[in-house]
Image: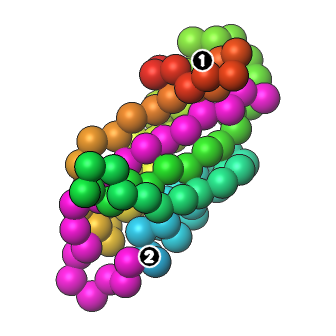
């Protein structure tokens, strides 16, 4: 199964939400469609960013990429209920490197 990453910048929390709810919302949303291999929160250029690695069911290359993008958008929608978000990027593991989808 192909492996993908979704990277999402977090620019703030919505009132009444704890920082832990950001990752929890992201994982919960992606797990409805895919196996989530890992999740992490880091700081990139002074801005918090979550990174989730997930697997997409194998089929044609473009279909896998489309599925990954759609799922990443759904994940961002879920996170936006608890946090303010910035840019979203989706990457695919190819020959040992992460390549933009």
Residue 40 painted magenta: no
Q: Residues within 10 Å of mark 2 (few under 14, many from 20)?
A: some
Res 66 visible: no
28 in relation to 90, above or below: below
Q: Nearer the viewer, residue 41 or 87?
A: 41
Quadrant of image for the N terminus: top right
The image quadrant of residue 47 is: bottom left
Q: From this view, report whether residue 24 is shown above or below residue 60.
A: below
Q: Is residue 17 left or right of residue 42?
A: left
Q: Residue at 71%, 50% (x, y): give it.
A: 37
Q: Could you tell me which residue is drawn at 69 percent across and 22 percent down?
A: 96
Q: Residue furthest bottom?
A: 16
Q: Which residue position is annotated with label 1?
A: 63
For residue 101, above or below residue 80: above
Q: Is 21 situated above or below 28?
A: below
Residue range of the region highlighted in magenta in the rendering:
1-19
Residue 63 point in image, percent of width and height: 60, 17
Q: Which residue is mark 2?
A: 21
Would residue 76 be found to the left or right of residue 101 on screen?
left
What residue sits 22% from the left and 68% below the top? Answer: 12
The count of marks equals 2
Work out which residue is located at the far front of the displayed protein and give it.
45
3 to the left or right of 5? right
Magenta span includes 3: yes
At x 46% / y 22%, what residue is drawn?
100
Q: Secondary structure at mark 1?
A: helix
In percent of width and height, residue 43 lies at 36, 57
Mark 2 / mark 1, whichever is N-terminal: 2
| Way the structure is coloured | rainbow
């Amino acid at each position: 199964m192909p492996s993908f990453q979704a990277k999402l910048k977090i620019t703030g929390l919505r009132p009444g939400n704890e920082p832990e709810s950001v990752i929890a919302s992201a994982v919960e949303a992606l797990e409805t469609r895919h196996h989530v291999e890992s999740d992490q929160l880091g700081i990139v250029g002074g801005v918090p960013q979550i990174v989730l690695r997930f697997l997409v069911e194998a089929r044609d290359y473009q279909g896998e990429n489309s599925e990954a993008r759609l799922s990443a958008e759904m994940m961002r929608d879920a996170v936006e209920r608890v946090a303010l978000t910035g840019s979203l990027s989706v990457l695919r593991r190819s020959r040992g490197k992460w390549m933009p989808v």
